[in-house]
Image (tube, helix red, strand yellow):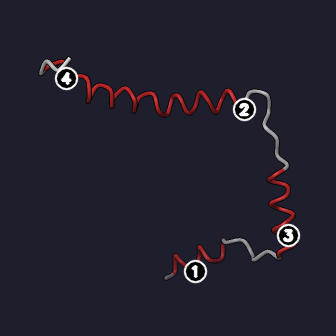
Amino acid sequence: MILLEKWKKRLPAEKTPQELDAHYSRMEKLELEKGDYLAMVLGAFLAFAPLLLVLAAIILIPMLLFGAL
């Protein structure tokens, strides 16, 4: 219980609807910088490429070993 009380003290105070609207409108106005799109594409590729390679290996290796190809 003590830990929960400490966490509760660290939580931000409740915001009024006007403060929330101002916060979300600032978030909507954020624009990407020049290299952000490239970084997102490379990050997605680096995240999914190993997974796709492992999946391809799981499918293709048994096919090659058991002569389905």
Distance from Cα at disc 3 to Cα at disc 2: 28 Å
Name the mark nearer the viewer: 3 or 1.
3
Residue under pointer 2: 36
| First in residue order: circle 4 vs circle 2 | 2
The residue shown at (82%, 61%) is 23
SS at circle 2: helix
Residue under pointer 4: 63
The residue shown at (85%, 58%) is 25
Q: Give the percent coordinates (x, y) of residue 20.
A: 81, 68
Residue under pointer 1: 5
Horizontally, residue 55 falls left or right of residue 68, namely: right
The residue shown at (62%, 77%) is 8
| First in residue order: circle 2 vs circle 1 | 1
Type of the residue with mark 4 = Met
- Quadrant of the image occupied by residue 50: top left
Mark 2 residue crowding within 10 angstroms, few (<14) / some (14–19) / many (20+): few
SS at circle 3: helix
- Quadrant of the image occupied by residue 66: top left
Type of the residue with mark 1 = Glu
Distance from Cα at disc 3 to Cα at disc 4: 59 Å
Mark 1 residue crowding within 10 angstroms, few (<14) / some (14–19) / many (20+): few
| First in residue order: circle 1 vs circle 4 | 1
Type of the residue with mark 3 = Glu
- Label drawn at residue 51: none
| First in residue order: circle 3 vs circle 2 | 3
Q: Give the percent coordinates (x, y) of residue 64.
A: 19, 18
Name the mark nearer the viewer: 2 or 1.
2
Distance from Cα at disc 4 to Cα at disc 2: 40 Å
